[in-house]
Image (cartoon, rainbow, N blue to C red):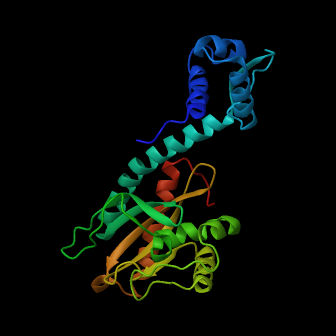
Amino acid sequence: MGRLVPAVTRALDILELFLEGDGTLSAPDIVRRLQLPRTTVHELVSTLTARSYLVAAPGRPGYYRLGVRPYQLGSRYAEQLDLAAEGQQVARTVAETCEETVHVAILEEADVIYVAKVDSTQAVRMVSAAGRRLPAHCTAVGKMLLASLPEGELAARLPDGAPLRAMTDNSVTDPVRLRGVLSGIRERGVAVEESESNPDVSCVAAPVRNRSGQVVAALSISVPLIRWSDERLPELEELAAKGAARLSERLGHRGTR
């Protein structure tokens, strides 16, 4: 474990005080409760207020309450818990319908992390595990998530000229070509990956949205090449889209976008 940073520890101590009582405190209250210097408390409270972790309590001059930022962090944490649990249930239903492996994944920097997985019941199936991390540009779920990013955020995660790792001979390693692929995914609303992360498996993925309509995950169906065909692709795309829509509804999303 690394060294704890005193200023960060004190700031967190201040925030945790607001979990008690009526949720409002003054700077003198914080000084008394934590036995910290007044100047330190003033600086920390000013910083927390500037970052929207604290706000002035309405009608109570000199008092503070929690701001919107802790709520946003808590909502994201709860959302991720819901996503893993709800994703597992929806993935199971989709897997039962198509008899193929189904994943739910989120984007972390330029990689995807699988948060839910249900195996195919077929003898020949994809070998993977929840918690696995792969380059986003090599997977259907990853390309779906990359395609959902605003251009500025996409550029930050995949800077122009940055090398793209190849996992198979089919992996897209040219940034310009990848941008074209992502453009097509935005138009179609689904992503397809043909043996780009595993030479023996292809996948199709669709976006999962939260209550505000933001894409927070993607649901994919992974199929060994012996059962993959152009004729079957429309059926798989529809199943992935319906499964992703069902999971989106469970996360509170309403509407088509």
Count the numbered circles shown.
0
As drawn, the residue found furthest toward the left would be: 123
Residue lying at 55% horizontally and 36% vertically, measured from the top left: 5
Residue depicted at x 69% and y 22%? 41
Quadrant where the N terminus is found in the figure = top left
Left or right: 80, with 221 as reference point? right
In the rendered image, the vertical position of residue 158 relative to residue 71, given as above or below: below
Position of residue 2 relative to residue 15, above or below, is below
Q: Quadrant of residue 236?
A: bottom left
Q: Position of residue 155 (x, y in %)?
A: 66, 70
Residue 163 x %, y %? 54, 80
Classify residue 142 as left or right of residue 176: left
Q: Quadrant of residue 45?
A: top right
Q: At 36% across and 52% down in the image, what residue appears? A: 89
Q: Is residue 120 left or right of residue 136?
A: left
- Taking depth in this image into account, of 47 and 54 the one nearest to the observer is 47
Q: Position of residue 253 (x, y in %)?
A: 57, 51
Q: Quadrant of residue 225?
A: bottom left
